[in-house]
Amino acid sequence: MRSGRVIVSVLFVVAALVAGCSSADEPSGPVVQRAWHGDIQVPGQPIGVGVTFAEDGSATIDIPVQGVRAAALKDVRTEPDRIEFTIPDAPGDPGFQGKLDGERIVGDWVQFGEKIPLTLERGVIESIARPQDPQPPYPYRSQDVTYRSGEVTIAGTLTEPEGNGPFPAMVMITGSGPQDRNEELSGHRPFHLLADTFTRAGYAVLRTDDRGIGGSTGVLDEATYPDLAADVAAGVAFLRDRPEIDPARVGLFGHSEGGYIAPMVAAKPDSNIAFAVLMAGPAVPGADVLIEQNKVVMAAAGATQDEIDAQVRYLTEWSALLRAGDTAGAKAYSQQHNDSLPEGERAPQGAVDSLNTPYMSALITYDPEPALRALRIPVLAFFGGTDQQVIATQNEPPMRAALAADPDATVHTFPGLNHLMQPSATGKPSEYSTIETTIDPAVPAYVTDWLTQHIPPR
């Protein structure tokens, strides 16, 4: 779930662009055409970037904590007194404006109209250790696939065990905001790791790009929850049409907001979903999740009680307008609130606009309880004990209550794990990129054991 102040974490997500690596070649002398690196000075969580300017006038960028590797840049200028570039097809038109200053490039990162200082030093940016990243060759089949969901094309990767099957299978559903098929975040690829784990255990796994991300078409901000549920149902139908998949044993795995969407799909009488796994899936309405999230995150960041109370009042009024269907009023209220803040605390206009879309309205107004109460299939719902985004103490008790009538439901909390199921004493989102572990090994082991007991691979 995204945090409610609209904020820097949204500001600098430029999405997973193109795979590759930066050149390490270093020409001598004070010229621009070489590799550079530096930190965008985002308060509390500087973001490291590497930029390589080539002799032919092209340039690429690496942002390790966001999984961006050698992404092509546009509008590149390399005159010593005017060094510029932009990142194509990224929110807020991100880019850089600066100049050569001796052995450094000094300037500003610009996004959503806001400028953040960025100084680039000579050298290639260091990669971030991600020891759990699956590496080929894989002991299973992997192929890129596409299928239709109404007018939208969904693109993804299907991994299948070796052999003829028929295999049990699952569709993976990402968390909130624009996510690629690996759910890449802070340099981690949790869905790639989980898909690898489950496929090795004997399950076919379909993971997909969200609408408007990667190979998928459509616009996420214009989508409603029924639209997103239809995308998941289309993935289920795609799997059931394949002869190597057992159509009676297709289930869902949802993380965070995906834990909202999975029960929506599974609760439909004709869905015939075989099982559902909910990782940090909320059990209370979206507005309640957002308000509690803000309380916890702001307190951990050192905000005063008065500041927290003011933020809660704002979010309560704004979400009440959305719940009442007054989207115009919600937009006006959020704009008025932002304009009332001191200039240095105001969110960029693009970030404010992103709060008042059909997609965000769906997230804020959704109540998962009816769908959860309707489930009569094997369900595993689990939480992280230090999660600051979907707080376990807020969501585990109502999850247990909502699933009480399901004869085969398991609810569990892993102590000391955050929203990504990384080991973390604090659970702060700002720490995601600094933790080498993508998912604590106890989690995929627990889920795999649950799967093999309830939906045996053979």
Image (cartoon, rainbow, N blue to C red):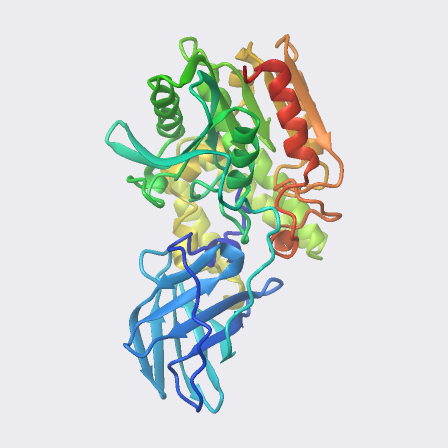
- Is 350 left, or right, of 296 in this rendering? left
Residue 395 appears in the rendering: no
Q: Position of residue 212 (x, y in %)?
A: 33, 43
> Percent position (x, y) of residue 283?
60, 26
Dividing the image into 4 quarters, which one contains the C terminus?
Answer: top right
Compared across the picture, whether 308 is left or right of 278 comes to: right
Nearest to the observer: residue 322 or residue 140: 140
- What is the quadrant of the N terminus in the image? top right
Along the horizontal axis of the image, is 62 left or right of 401? left
In the image shown, does 173 or 224 lie closer to the viewer? 173
Q: What x and y, as percent, mark residue 294? A: 62, 46
Residue at 71% from the left image edge and 45% from the top image edge: 423
Along the line of sight, the residue nearer the viewer: 326 or 69: 69
Identify the residue shown where x is 39% and y is 39%.
Answer: 210
The number of callouts visible is: 0
**Residue 244: x and y, percent?**
39, 19
Residue 49 vs 327, above or below: the answer is below
Q: Against 191, is 110 above or below?
A: below
Q: Is residue 181 visible?
A: yes
- Residue at image coords 40%, 41%: 329
Is 353 located above or below residue 30 in the figure? above
Direction left: furthest residue:
151
The residue nearer to you, when weighing 67 against 129, is: 129
